[in-house]
Each structure stands twice: as structure tokens, then as C-alpha cells.
Image: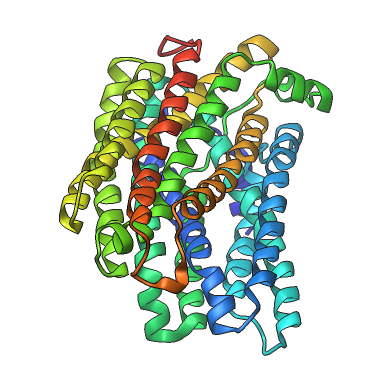
Amino acid sequence: MTSLRASLRDRRLQSAPTRRQSIAFGVSGFPTQLMTQTFSAFVVYFYVTRLGVEPTWVAAAMIAHGILNAALNPLVGALSDRIRSRWGRRIPWIGLGIVPLVVAFALVWMPPPLPAAGLIVWFLVVVAVYDVAFVVVVLNISALFPEIFRTTEERARGNVPRQIFAILGIVLGTAGAPRLYGWIGWSGMALVLAGICLVLLVVSFLGGMIERDVPRAASEAMRWRDQLRYTFANRAFVPYVLGSLFIQTSIAVILAAVPFYVRYSLGAEEGEGSLLLGAIFVTAIPSIVLWSAVVRRTSPRTAMLWSVAVFGLAVLGYLLPSGVMAAALVGVAVGVGVGGLLQLLEVVLAQIIDDDAVRTGHRREGAYFGVNGFVVRGSVVLQAVVAAVVLTASGFDASLGDAQPEAVDGGIRVMVAVVPLVFAALAWLCFWLYPIRTRDL
């Protein structure tokens, strides 16, 4: 144990990371997305349908979860930048947070036999621990990315394995989790997935999470007021974070609209939605490699503008199909754009952090990723508002089953195609205003 602590304390990255280190760091994308997608896709279903908790109580608990998660991001980010130790700024947070994160994730699905009120208390407490641990671990992993990979070339290559692992985690979280809980129950599913996440996070932590020596002046604590002032006065960050909010809202609206689109516009079984989502994410994997090559030959700004344009034009195709297979083909085109967005968002943010370090003399990865995480949580709110407005305006009535008014088909097609295009257009405008036009500072 002593030798392990010493090796973690003494190791520092002095040059470009090796391929092995890049892959090990990228492995972290799998467990973090696996937990995220499993939680977001099934926790409401589990507590409402399996445990019998009132939907309004669960909704209130989820709102509390969203508020806490959003508030934690800038707080943890700023603290991470301010704290110095012999092990570095990020490594202690990640190392101490992995086990609580995995345990809390498992306990969400393993409540004791309690009445409904007790189950809500259990949910609130366990999810609060999960939120704190998740933000502590994932934000600090994200903050390591601009530090480990220092040039656009390194970042374009280094982000490929991470995003591919992330997509695989999304697929297992959305498609594999139902098979597991149907086979071995919810507690069994929780233990299996938590075990996978623990092993992969430890592998990534030991093999790929390495800090560089940061000059003392660059890591000195900045006053809270200055943190906010420099962050929101950054003329590159403001258009970036708004563009990120808009594009993530666009994706969130599509994911929320797909079940309605499949059933009420295409007239297919709800399960067919997996074909549409699968087409997007399966295509995104090879397209990540494609966009990595594009950004290495152009610049982060240019590549981002192209990827947003491809995504926005592709989603408009959802207006036309009358069958699932045709809609899946549209999903292939959408997936090309999604792959670019997954690849480029953190590459661009890393460039902003470099620019800030030049201007302020401070390396503030935590602050930028924290504020970004806080702002983009708004995509959940915008997505919910869009769904409510469109469905209500089109006359959707769940009690009518498949016998919906004719306007519902048109409304849903607007929600899955036109609304995402509008948000993508707003994102494109924001990224067009992004002022850093070179590859490296």
C-alpha cells in the first residue's frame, strides 16, 4: 500500500502521453456513461413501477437531484483548482471518490423494505451521495484531459478512445441494463454494473490518470470573485458554453422524441426505437475517428462548425420517413454529426482553458468544466419545455392510445426534426462567433 501511494505521488507526465496511457485514460468514459445512462433511463421506472412510489414524489426527488448536481459542478471545479497536494490537484479527488461513487450507484437500486415515504428518503440520501461522488470523480477526470493532452493534435487523437468507450457505455446502459434486470433482478443488475464500473475506473485511474507538474503560480488559489469574473469575461467561453447548451438541448430533444416518433408517427412498436438510437450511436463510433482527422487538418472551430452543420441538416431528414428503416437511415447521417460533437466539444473547451492560462497565469480546468457542467444542465429543462409545449399544442392525449388527432403526427415530426434544427442553428451561430481560429495558441 505504501509503495502504491508513493508511485501515485511521484509519477508525473513530462511529455506527450503514450498510446497505452491514452487508452487507459479513455477507459474512464465507459463506466461514467454506463452509470449516467442507466440512472437517467431507468431510475424513475424502477421507483414508480417496481417500488410503487407516487410519480409526483419521484419527480420532486429528481428535481432535487438536478438542482444539486448543477450546483455541485462549479463548486467542485473551483475547489479542485484551489487545492494542492503532494499527489497533485485532481488525483486525490478521483482516488477518494471512486468507491463511494460505485457503492452509491449500486444502493440506488437496492433499497431496504420501506414504506413509500421511507423509499423517497432513501432515494434522496443515496442519490445525494451519488451526485457528490459523481461530480467529484467525473469533473476531475474531465479536468485532466486538457492537462494530459496539450496540443490539438494530442487532444484529437487522445479523445478518440475516450469517446468510443463512452458510446459503448451508453449502449450497455440503455440496452444491456434491461436484459440484466430481467435475468437476475434489479439488485443483481446493480451489483454486476457496479462491479464493472469499479474495475474499469480503477484500471483507468492506475494506468491513465497522470498529472503534470504545474508551476506553483499557475495553481495558486484565485479569489472566488476573480474566478467568476475571468470565466464569464472570457470572450471565447461565453459563445462556447451557449453553443454547447444549444447543441446538447438539440440531442436531448431528439432522444426524448424518438419513442413518440416511433409509435405515433411511424406506427411501429415502441421497441423499434432501439433501431433508431442504435443507428445514431453505432455510426458515431467510426465518425469520431473521421472528425479526429478533420480537426487535425483544420482547427477546432472549423471542425465544430462542420459537425454542427452536418448534424443540423441530417436531423431535418426525420420529417420524411414513413417507416422505421427509413428513419434509421436518417439516424446514420445524424450519427455522423453526433460523432463530431462528442469528439470536439472537449477539444474546444481545452483550447479555451489554454487561452485563459495565457491571460491569467492560472490553470483553471476545474472552474471551466464546472461552469460548463452547470450551464448545460439547462438542456434537461429546455428539453422538457419543448416536449410539453409541442405535445400540448398538437392535442396529444395519452388516454387515446394510438387514436391520436391527426395534428399529433405533425407535431411530433416538428419536435424530432425542426426543433433540433433550430437549436443546432443557434449553436452554429455561437460557434461561428467563437474567436479562436487557430489550432494551437
Could you tell whether 80 is left or right of 430 in the image? right
- Determine the residue positioned at 44% across, 49% down: 29
Q: Is residue 182 above or below residue 95?
A: below
Where's the N terminus, which quadrant?
A: bottom right
- Percent x, y of residue 55: 62, 73
Instruction: Return the residue nearer the eye: 252 or 140.
Output: 252
Could you tell whether 136 is left or right of 311 in the image? right
- Determine the residue positioned at 41% across, 72% down: 400
Instruction: Return the residue nearer the eye: 263 or 152.
Output: 263
User: Does the rendering let one see residue 24?
Assistant: no
- Percent x, y of residue 373: 61, 39
Could you tell whether 22 is left or right of 128 in the image? left
- Percent x, y of residue 367: 68, 31
Specify the quadrant of the image occupied by residue 214.
top right
- Percent x, y of residue 381: 60, 47
Could you tell whether 97 is left or right of 250 in the image? right
Colouring: rainbow
- Determine the residue positioned at 37% across, 21% down: 305
Q: Is residue 255 above or below residue 287?
A: below
User: Does the rendering let one see residue 333?
Assistant: yes
Instruction: Return the residue nearer the eye: 16 or 241.
Output: 241
